[in-house]
Image (cartoon, grey):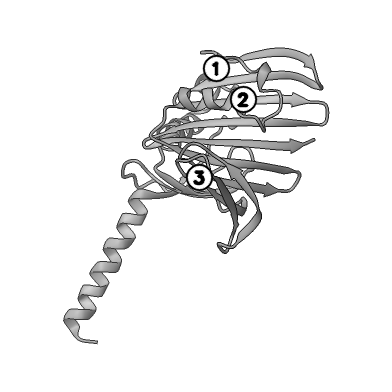
């Protein structure tokens, strides 16, 4: 290899490493504790992120200085992440919706059409999630606000007991006692750019998560058994 070409290759690899290091990162999922690679909304040398609060109601005042710093950085970068690859989940089917009322075939992981299909009237991108004692769906709605997407969820026909959900997510943490149709209660948590809802049943829980990203809204609906 010629000296100039070798030097150019070294500089390119060094530049590529710097870009990945500054704009890439790994964070630990609050619910499943898996490590997920993501793209930051702004450069930072910090690589690994986790939330000391996780799914609890712990405040910053209750944390040590080290955990407080971690939580502040997590709240700054994770809700605003541009893209992520959730390596801890099993993506067995990919659904690509088109802006029409036609039925769209569900594709498997290698791109082959299955016998299943989904009828859609809006442009969104969804993946089915499968794991131990859980199943669910993750979707991305481009160019939508979190309140617009939440309103759509209220009319989601394949989501059980949506009629018990509030028309708007409360500004503060709230629990509604239901005790109907096997549904015990619904917990609401609202943070900056994030809605987190848990529907507790006898024998399981349905988790609904909405994240406002820069270019749209990501939703996760997870059905977990006790």
**Furthest residue in direction left, as rendered:** 4
Circle 1 SS class: loop
Which x, y percent locates residue 82? 39, 43
Q: As rendered, which of 181 and 187 lies closer to the eye? A: 181
> What number is the disc on residue 169?
1
Residue that numbered label 3 is attached to: 97
Identify which residue is drawn at 52% across, 39% down.
101
Mark 1 vs 2, N-terminal side? 1
Residue that carries the numbered disc 2 in the rendered image: 197
Pointer 1 local density, CA inside 10 Å: few below 14, some 14–19, many at least 20: some
Which quarter of the rendering shows the C terminus? top right
Q: Quadrant of the N terminus?
A: bottom left
Q: Nearer the viewer, mark 3 or mark 1?
A: 3
- Looking at the image, which residue is at 48% across and 29% down? 68
Q: Give SS at disc 3.
A: loop
Closer to the observer: label 3 or label 2? Answer: 3
Q: On residue 79, which mark appears?
A: none
Q: Position of residue 166 (x, y in %)?
A: 60, 15
Question: Farthest residue in the front direction?
Answer: 102
């Amino acid at each position: 290899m010629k000296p100039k070409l070798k030097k150019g290759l070294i500089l390119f690899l060094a530049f590529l490493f710097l870009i990945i290091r500054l704009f890439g990162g790994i964070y630990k999922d609050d619910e499943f504790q898996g490590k997920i690679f993501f793209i930051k909304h702004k450069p930072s040398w910090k690589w690994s992120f986790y939330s000391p609060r996780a799914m609890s109601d712990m405040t910053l005042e209750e944390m040590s200085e080290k955990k407080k710093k971690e939580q502040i950085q997590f709240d700054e970068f994770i809700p605003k992440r541009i893209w992520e690859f959730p390596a801890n989940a099993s993506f067995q089917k990919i659904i690509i919706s088109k802006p029409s009322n036609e039925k769209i075939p569900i594709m498997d992981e290698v791109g082959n059409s299955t016998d299943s299909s989904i009828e859609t009237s809006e442009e969104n991108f969804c993946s089915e999630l499968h794991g131990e004692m859980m199943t669910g769906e993750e979707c991305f709605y481009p160019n939508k606000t979190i309140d617009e997407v939440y309103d759509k969820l209220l009319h989601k026909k394949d989501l059980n007991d949506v009629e018990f959900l509030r028309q708007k997510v409360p500004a503060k943490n709230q629990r509604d006692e239901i005790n109907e149709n096997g549904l015990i209660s619904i917990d609401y948590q609202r943070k900056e750019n994030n809605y987190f809802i848990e529907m507790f049943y006898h024998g399981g829980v349905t988790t609904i998560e909405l994240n406002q990203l820069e270019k749209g809204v990501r939703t996760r609906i997870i059905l977990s058994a006790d």
